[in-house]
Amino acid sequence: MTPSPTAAPSGPPAPSGPPGPGAPDKTDLPDSELLRLDHQVCFSLHAASRAFGGVYRDALKDLGLTYPQYLVMLVLWEDGPRPVKAIGERLRLDSGTLSPLLKRLEAAGLVRRERSAADERSVTVHLTDDGAELRERALAVPRRILEATGMTVEEVLALQGLLGRLTGALDRAAG
Amino acid sequence: MTPSPTAAPSGPPAPSGPPGPGAPDKTDLPDSELLRLDHQVCFSLHAASRAFGGVYRDALKDLGLTYPQYLVMLVLWEDGPRPVKAIGERLRLDSGTLSPLLKRLEAAGLVRRERSAADERSVTVHLTDDGAELRERALAVPRRILEATGMTVEEVLALQGLLGRLTGALDRAAG
DNA sequence: CGTCATTCAGTTGTGCACAACTAAATCGTG
DNA sequence: CACGATTTAGTTGTGCACAACTGAATGACG
């Protein structure tokens, strides 16, 4: 497939140590090495995310859902009717993404949107009967995903923890 | 910002052991538990990918590059002139994504596209002088990213390995 | 040589991500 | 009560991901 999937040359970068002092952390790699590493890492994450997307796409095709639509349905199945704002906070999505997505879910007959009487700015998203029933069919999806990862539940949980820490750090760094 | 950034409840899912025998692997969790777990995991990956995207967006703003454009430039900086097909294989991107992206890089004066004389179907992507010079400024990016992750180089390498295994398994499962 | 399958880049259409903005409703404070 | 700031959904515009398709060039085979 790929000409050099994990082309991590075992040869260490620059034999001549740069003027860095005796720092225990290896953050004093030469910039060019870091650039190469960056290539590997951001490619890895990008590729993993897209590979996951592909597997979900297959698994969700029967349900007629996309991956982000599935995320929204998971929130509604677990939490019940929620305002758009709450769904956005849960999934880190803003109205620019959610508004058209919810419109498509509504057009598919899975959800209903209602202006709140108490606060006319807010729109509460409800499941329709069809939307609620879809959960039964969705129950088969996670096992397919788990099998596709080739990981155990424990490994998945460990990965999830790692990703959680990472996301927290990145969010903190990016404001 | 977010109300539940790393909502990873330390309590394992089902304290009450389901009727599973002494299986070491926990793939016999009830479906509803797997659905909840799936919520956590796919959300985690999605969120991590987008958080990374945000940090790269900041770091690359100065260079006038998006994250996928940066990936393409990394390939060209490392490998030199490459046909579109080779770039796509390296990054797992098809022509539907690459063609407009490369057009934008060309409009920005960073690359040049030339029909191959030997095979008129193929288009070889070259760096312009500006594109080659941009590498100097890009050298500062990876360190910013590494700092944002709050991880050591070793941890990043471990994560990369984990993601690589995962992507391999997912690609195998999805064909 | 002629035909057909394959390869390669590009185009079209749908959907998501995100920035920047709009518009309406609500709230706080004077 | 009046007025300005904030909150909430929605819209617009740019860019990426991917499926499905087009069209030209190439290669294989009879």
Image (cartoon, coloured by chain):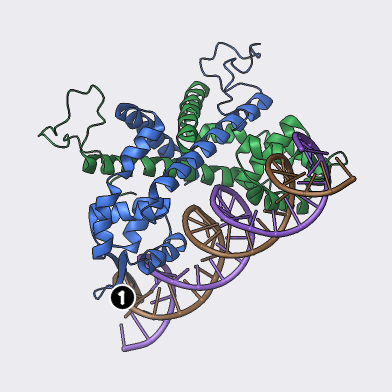
Chain colours: A green, B blue, C purple, D brown
Residue B40 placement: quadrant: top right
Q: Nearer the viewer, residue B98 or B103?
A: B103
Kindly identify which residue carries mark 1: B120
Q: Residue furthest left?
A: A16
Residue A136 placement: quadrant: top right
Residue A34 image offset from top left, x and y in percent: 26, 39
Residue A169 image offset from top left, x and y in percent: 46, 30
Residue B144 image offset from top left, x and y in percent: 35, 39
Q: Which residue is painted at 29% across and 39% down in the image? A: A37
Q: Is residue B3 left or right of residue B161?
A: right
Q: Amino acid at mark 1?
A: Glu
Q: Which residue is painted at 62% across and 21% down in the image? A: B29
Q: Is residue B87 left or right of residue A137?
A: left
Instruction: Say if residue A136 shows up in the picture.
Output: no
Residue A44 placement: quadrant: top left
Label 1 lies in what chain?
Answer: B
